[in-house]
Image: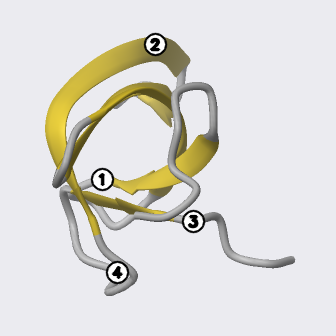
Amino acid sequence: MEGLIEGRIIHYVAYNQRHLASLVSGVNETKIDLAVFTNMSDVNGIKNFSLQFHQDVEFSQEIKPGTCHWIEKA
C-alpha cells in the first residue's frame, strides 16, 4: 500500500464490475476508507450521481469486486 495517503484518487471495483473514481479518506495498516463517486443510470435511463462512503476496503491489484486499486494507465 505504498503511496496510499489521504487525498489520493484510486479506483473502487463495484459489484457490477465498474471501476469507480474514489478519493482516499483514511488509511490504516491493512484497510482503506473511501469516498466513491457514482454516475449510474436508473431503470428509466436517468443518470443518478451520488457519493458513497466505504470503510475498511481492501487494496488489491487483483481486480475483484469490493476492492480498490491504482488507476490503470490510459
Q: Earlier in the sequence, mark 1 or mark 2?
A: 1
Residue with the mark numbered 4: 63
Structural crowding at the residue carrying mark 1, measured as other residues with C-alpha within 10 Å and reported as few (<14), some (14–19) or many (≥20)? some
Front residue of this view, candidates 7 and 49: 7
Q: Is residue 72 above or below residue 69?
A: below
Give the distance between the C-alpha atoms of the residues marked 1 and 2, in whole angstroms: 14 Å
Image location of residue 29, percent across then percent down: 19, 49
Give the distance between the C-alpha atoms of the residues marked 3 and 1, in whole angstroms: 14 Å
User: Residue 8's image quarter?
Assistant: top right
Give the distance between the C-alpha atoms of the residues marked 1 and 4, in whole angstroms: 10 Å
Residue at (49%, 16%) from the top-left corner? Answer: 48
Which one is closest to the eye, mark 3 or mark 1? 3
Residue with the mark numbered 3: 70
SS assignment at label 3: loop
Image location of residue 64, percent across then percent down: 24, 76
Structural crowding at the residue carrying mark 3, measured as other residues with C-alpha within 10 Å and reported as few (<14), some (14–19) or many (≥20)? some
| Amino acid of disc 3 | Trp
Give the distance between the C-alpha atoms of the residues marked 4 and 2, in whole angstroms: 23 Å
Residue with the mark numbered 1: 14
Mark on residue 57? none
Which one is closest to the eye, mark 3 or mark 2? 3
| Amino acid of disc 1 | Ala
Give the distance between the C-alpha atoms of the residues marked 4 and 3, in whole angstroms: 10 Å
Image location of residue 12, percent across then percent down: 40, 51
Q: Earlier in the sequence, mark 4 or mark 2?
A: 2
Q: Earlier in the sequence, mark 4 or mark 3?
A: 4
Front residue of this view, candidates 53 and 32: 32
Residue with the mark numbered 2: 50
Residue at (61%, 26%) from the top-left corner? Answer: 7
